[in-house]
Amino acid sequence: MSLERALFLSGSFGKGHDTLAEACLAALEPCGVRSEIVDSMALLGSGPGAVGDWVFRRLLAVPPIYDGFHFSQLRGDGPVGRFADRAAIGTMMPHLRRTYARWDPQLVVSVFATGAGAAARLKREHPDLLTVVFITDAFAHRMWVHEGTDLFLVTSELTAASVRRYWPRARVEVVTAPVRRAFYDAPDQSEARRALGVPADARCVLLISGAWGIGPLDEVAASLAASGIWVLAVAGTNTRLVAKLERLARDERRVIPFGWTDRVPELMAACDAVVTSSGDTCREARALGRGLILLDVVPGHGRENVMHELELGNAAVCSPTADSVVGTVRAFLADRGPAESSGHHLISAAQWEQAFVGALQAAGIDLSGNQPDPPRSLT
């Protein structure tokens, strides 16, 4: 089956899902594939989508409740989780059918759990449609896995095993998760520090916790700066946190605040280590050879991701309190010299795109009509 059009089902919870969809789209472009990215929350409609967003944010704000829901209902395949999945799929389907009729894709790639079930149901209506689910979390929960999906892409054997927990016969391929191209072009540390005004001999960390700026980042930044560490503090889309960090920076020169910014590759290059919640930032830090101090601040899937990052090494974990972060950062940096310059990429962008295309071909998706050039060796 020759592939000409693809549809990506993303999700507007944070920015990581769109980042993944955009990387996949870029990999398919040289193969002559036209793609479109659709927000699964938008497919729920303005009413249910807004309610879903509100509920998710409220659950995150009360970790014990979110943990209970995640581990008993999503990962545990509980009745409330199954009901939520069926309700979301039923609400999405009329909108997804219209999108399918307009775009007429041969492939649907779900990078968001809410889209995975709807894509599987769409495939039952259109048996020739190819469906792929791409999971970058460390452990899949039930809403990710629906029988009939042609291929699951995951980033570790751990995640592959979690998919097969729900469907033992699932076809699963392990690939490296992508890193945005800008991180391959990051400056070296000295150049980045000159641009930011960070002294060349200072200890410096990047403090960032997802697009929503989750956790007491202002308190953490203040305590790190008071201990003598420079802090590049990113609040993301959290406007209240931006204001707090800007007020802090007026009295503390070691704190350099940012809201939503595209300078993260530069900030990461300037620092010695990255203090962050588990997520895409971890892969980006590893691509630049930066160690991780993980904030255990995201419940549910965030707990699973933290454990996997610790297993990968060059990482420490702390509680989301100022004292815990400062103690962990100081101990982590004491065991290491200044961070080296960038250039520690685990895999190049071209190599990742080739691996992604290869995984699709292994599942029987024909991309032979216009193959991208093979990547050059890094050695």
Image: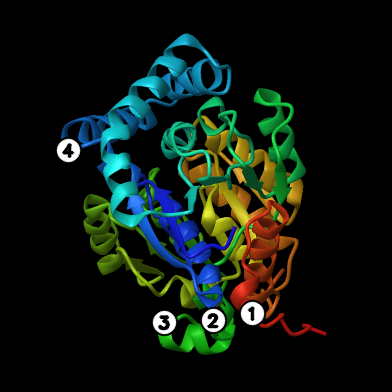
Instruction: Give the distance between the C-alpha atoms of the residues marked 2 and 4, in whole angstroms.
Output: 38 Å
Place of residue 374 in the rendered image (x, y in percent of width and height, measured from the top left): 71, 80
Name the residue nearer the viewer: 323 or 123.
123
Colour scheme in the image?
rainbow
Give residue 186's mark. Answer: 2
User: Position of 372 compared to 25: left or right?
Assistant: right
**Numbered disc 3: secondary structure:** helix
Give residue 342's mark. Answer: 1
Instruction: Give the distance between the C-alpha atoms of the residues marked 3 and 2, in whole angstroms.
Output: 14 Å
Is there a contact, CB below 8 Å, between mark 2 and mark 1? yes
The residue under label 4 is which amino acid type?
Answer: Ser
The residue under label 3 is which amino acid type?
Answer: Leu
Rendered residue at 50%/84% (across/down): 192
The residue under label 2 is which amino acid type?
Answer: Ala
Q: Among all residues in the image, which is located at the extreme left?
A: 47
Place of residue 71 in the rendered image (x, y in percent of width and height, measured from the top left): 55, 20
Residue labelled with disc 4 = 46
Residue labelled with disc 3 = 196
Q: Which of marks 2 and 4 is nearer the N terminus?
A: 4
Place of residue 306 in the rendered image (x, y in percent of width and height, measured from the top left): 62, 41
Q: Earlier in the sequence, mark 1 or mark 3?
A: 3
